[in-house]
Amino acid sequence: MTLKLLLNGLFNAIWRVFAFLLILFAVYIALGRQLIPNIPSYRLELAGYVSQALGADIHINEIEGEWIGFGPSITARGIQAGPELNIGEVRLDISVLASIARGRLVANYLEIKNARAELVERASDGSWLLGDLVFQRNQAQPTELTVDDVVTRLVPLLDHDVVAVRDLEFDLVINQLPKLNVRINDGQVRGEFSDKNLSLDLTVTSDEQIAGVELLANIDDWG
């Protein structure tokens, strides 16, 4: 009899916890659907946050949010970092529960479309200029990034299910070498955790010579 009472008590406790979590999840969905349309009012604050994180003045023309499935989706358009870096659109589908669990922003899907950029090597110190961003090979000034900084910040992006790049074009200007124009028609990194599948369809142009490249690769133990 005592065992039966214990089992009944345990079952009731589990059921109450489950019911509480279900109600909490429903409240989360309802609040999310109510709050996410207000994202445009925080455009300047978000641009300031990105500017501070990258150490460059980032301008965002338009931003909007919608609720898809169990999480928010944020789309930013008209992103600029100086005259040489323009991104038409960035879409970020955020996984709220995974972000809370990992203590940082985690997205299920990241897409970058219609980007134009010029990457220039600076002869004086061998650093690279990308719009208002300055990348150093090693010791950087407070307003500059090292290559290690860039890798450290990019690796978390590739933890997500899908990272997609479409219609990305940039000019690569290296001292005393002909300018290279690289156009990525379509590129994706798919996978989870340390196993990534990379696909790229790109075109490289130099001195009117054109080469098409298709790349498929599997990256084990990423990061």
Image (tube, rainbow, N blue to C red):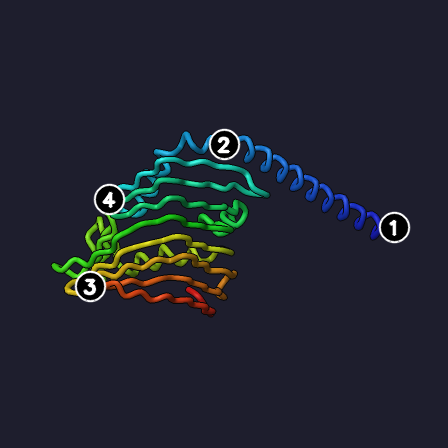
For discs 2 and 4, the disc positioned in front in the rendered view: 4
Q: Earlier in the sequence, mark 3 or mark 2?
A: 2
**Element at label 2:** helix
Residue occupied by mark 4: 83
**Element at label 3:** loop
Q: Residue at x 83, y 52 (%)?
A: 3
| Picture quadrant of residue 217 | bottom left
Residue occupied by mark 3: 178
Q: CA distance from mark 3 to mark 2?
A: 47 Å
Residue 219 visible at all: no
Viewer-closest of 6 and 41: 41
Residue occupied by mark 1: 1
For discs 3 and 1, the disc positioned in front in the rendered view: 3
Marks 3/1 in contact by CB < 8 Å: the verdict is no
Marks 4/1 in contact by CB < 8 Å: the verdict is no
**Element at label 4:** loop
Residue occupied by mark 2: 37
Neighbor class of circle 1 (other Cα within 10 Å; few <14, some 14-19, many 20+) is: few
Q: CA distance from mark 2 to mark 4?
A: 30 Å
Residue 82 image offset from top left, x and y in percent: 24, 44
Amino acid marked by disc 2: Pro
Neighbor class of circle 4 (other Cα within 10 Å; few <14, some 14-19, many 20+) is: few
Residue 154 visible at all: yes
